[in-house]
Image: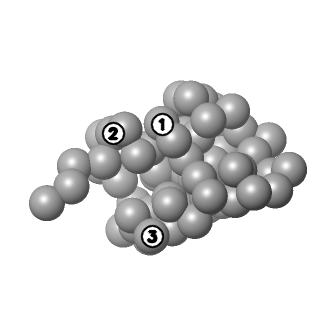
Amino acid sequence: MEIHSSVTLKRVMDAANRRLTTLDDPGLCLHCGADAEGVEPDAQEYECEICGESGVYGAEEILMRLELP
């Protein structure tokens, strides 16, 4: 799956840190790049409220899937 260009390592790390330091449960849509809330850290293929695709993943799950240089 191709990851939307706005889903950067910094953005995913910020979301993962937010989950650890607040009551937020952030995720991101890999299709359109939208933020999602109420997403478990290991979530995969949740439906995006913005684009309707099954592309929402938990921040920690995205970190495990990112290919780092």
Q: Quadrant of residue 62?
A: top left
Disc 2 element: helix
Q: Position of residue 41 (x, y in %)?
A: 62, 35
Residue farthest right in this picture:
23
- Residue 10's tag is 3
Residue neighbourhood size for the residue with mark 1, other residues' Cα within 10 Å, grouped as few (<14), some (14–19), many (≥20): some
Alpha carbon distance from label 1 to label 3: 15 Å
Q: Is residue 50 visible?
A: no
Q: Which residue is mark 1?
A: 61
Q: Position of residue 42 (x, y in %)?
A: 56, 29
Alpha carbon distance from label 2 to label 3: 14 Å
Total labels drawn: 3
The kind of residue on which mark 2 rests is: Arg
Decide which of 56, 27 is in the foreground and name it: 27
With 19 as the anchor, is 51 left or right in this view? left
Sequence-wise first label, 2 or 3: 3
Disc 1 element: helix
The kind of residue on which mark 3 rests is: Lys
Alpha carbon distance from label 2 to label 1: 6 Å
With 38 as the anchor, is 27 left or right in this view? left
Q: What color scheme is it?
A: one colour
Residue neighbourhood size for the residue with mark 2, other residues' Cα within 10 Å, grouped as few (<14), some (14–19), many (≥20): few
Q: Which residue is mark 2?
A: 65
Q: Residue at x 81, y 56 (%)?
A: 22
